[in-house]
Image (spheres, rainbow, N blue to C red):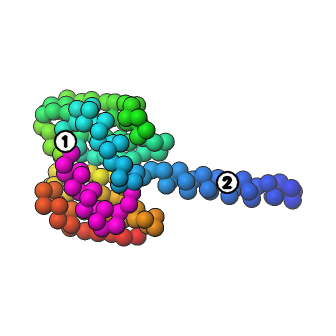
Amino acid sequence: MNAMQKMLLIPASALLLTAAASSAQADALSMDRVDEVLVPAVDYGFTHYEEISIKSRGRAEVEGWLDDEWYADVEFSLGNGETLKEERKRLITGAWGMSEEDVRQALEVARKEGMSEFEDIDIDKGGIIDIEGRDENGRELEISLRQGSYEITEIDRD
């Protein structure tokens, strides 16, 4: 590799690293923009949420129940709420998960603990809600709490 090729390689590498870092940052949503996910999800028919994840390219993925039989996995555009991908399954387990109010309350607890952006919120069958996100300094923050009481069971600050 000659000197000219090396000189061109260094800026190109820096550009790729910058692009990778900014795309990683794009996988989170400001806490005050949660309606960009919840409004289209409610309009779609979700009654119970198992997981809400913020994806790259301005997308959110919502997994949960439409009623006692139908489970859905849907991607929405954060800008306009457009349905981008959908998959439905008929299951016999019955609806379970977080209500819209559970999601809002859990995110409010996380906000009070310093979370400014969330990446993912999910619940397990035991009723523990896990929220992953970042504080205003960009540091990772993970919070676990109990459904209903919204009592924090664990906080991990990186």
How many numbered dots are placed on residues in this image? Answer: 2
- Vertical placement of residue 82 versus 115, above or below: above
Residue 123 visible in the picture: no
Labels 1 and 2: the sequence-earlier one: 2
Residues at circles 1 and 2 in contact by the CB criterion of under 8 Å: no
Please state which amino acid type lies under the numbered disc 1: His
Asked if the magenta segment contains residue 156, the reply would be no
How many other residues sit within 10 Å of disc 1, few (<14), some (14-19) or many (≥20)?
many
Distance, label 1 to label 2, CA atoms, is 42 Å
Look at mark 2 in the image and give the residue it sits on: 15
Q: Residue at x 41, y 40 (%)?
A: 78
Q: Which residues are magenta?
A: 100-117
Q: Which residue is mark 1?
A: 48
Q: Residue furthest front?
A: 32
The disc placed on residue 72 is none
Residue 153 can be seen, yes or no: yes
Residue 119, position as x, y percentages in the image: 38, 53
Crowdedness near tag 2: few (<14), some (14–19) or many (≥20) residues, C-alpha within 10 Å: few
Horizontal side, residue 93 vs residue 17: left or right: left
